[in-house]
Amino acid sequence: MNTVERIAQQLQTRIRSKEWTSAGKLPGQRQLSEELGVSRASLRSAITMLESLGLLRSEPGRGVFIVRMGAEGSGKAFERWRLQSRYALRDVYLVRNEMEELAVAMATSVVTEAGIACLRTTIDRMEAAAVADDLVAMSEADRTFHARIFEIAGSSMLHDLADSIADVIEPSRQIAFADPARVREPIREHARIVAAMATGSPSAARRAMRAHICNVADRAGLALAIPGV
C-alpha cells in the first residue's frame, strides 16, 4: 500500500471498532494528524479515499462524519463523484475502457505463466480483503490488478498515459465499491479477465475487460454504452 492507503486503512480500522461512534464523526484533522504522525495533506487524501468508498462524508464547516451502512444515500456512488464539475463520470469510464481494452489485448499477446500467477495473486488478495470487510485493501488490490496488466503489456507510452490520469481514474474505481451486496463482483470479473488472458486470445480478453468496466459503471449508477460496440 502507498502512504495514503495505509492511513486510510488505519482510519477504517478505528471506524469499524466504533471508536468514534458517540461523536459520529472524526476528530479535527490537526488532532488526528498528530495522533497518526502523518501530514495533514496525506490525511486529507486518505479521508477523500474513504469518502469515495462510502465510509465518510465531509460537511464544510461541520467536520467529517461517519456514514452508517444502510443509511439513506450511503450507497449512492454517483453522488460521491467529486470531479463532476470537470469530468463527466461516463466519459471517465469510456476513456478508461479504451485504455484498459488495449492494455489487456497487448498483455494477452505476451503474458507468461508467471504473469498469470501474479494476476491471480491480486485476486486472492481481493478475496481475503472481502472476507475481512476491508474496503481499503480491496481497493488497493483492485488498483494493483489493473496496474499489473499495464506492466505486462509493456508499453511505456500506455503506462505513462494511465499514470497521467491516475488522479481521475482512482476515485472512479473507488466509488464502484458502494454497494455491499455487490462488493465481490469485481473479484469474479477479474477472474474472467485472467481466464481469457490465459487462453491467449486478445479478443476474448478485450470482451472480458469491456464487460468488467461496464459493470464497474453499473455499480456506480451508470448504464455505460460503448460507442461502436
Image (cartoon, helix red, strand yellow):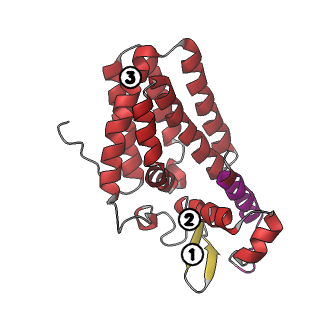
Comparing labels 1 and 3, the label whose residue is closer to the camera: 3
Report the Cα–Cα distance between label 1 and label 3: 41 Å
Q: Element type at marker 3? A: helix
Residue 179 place in picture, x, y as percent: 50, 55
Q: Which residues are magenta?
A: 4-23
Q: Is residue 196 visible?
A: no
* Of callouts 1 and 3, the N-terminal one: 1
Around disc 2, counting alpha carbons within 10 Å, would you say few (fewer than 14), some (14 to 19), or many (20 or more)? many
Inspect the image, locate mark 3, and give the three-letter code of the amino acid beneath it.
Answer: Met
Q: Is residue 147 magenta?
A: no
* Of callouts 3 and 2, the N-terminal one: 2
In the rendered image, the quadrant that contains the C terminus is: top left
Name the quadrant containing residue 79. Answer: bottom left
Report the Cα–Cα distance between label 1 and label 2: 8 Å
| Residue shown at 57% from the left, 64% from the top | 48
Q: Please give the count of numbered marks on the rendered protein.
A: 3
Contact flag, marks 1 and 2 (Cβ < 8 Å): yes
**Label 3 belongs to which residue?**
106
Inspect the image, locate mark 1, and give the three-letter code of the amino acid beneath it.
Answer: Ser
Residue 178 place in picture, x, y as percent: 50, 57
| Residue shown at 32% from the left, 29% from the top | 207
**Label 2 belongs to which residue?**
51
Looking at the image, which is closer to me, 210 or 84?
84
Left or right side of 217 for 152:
right
* Of callouts 1 and 2, the N-terminal one: 2
In the rendered image, the quadrant that contains the N terminus is: top right
Q: Is residue 139 visible?
A: yes
Q: Element type at marker 2? A: helix
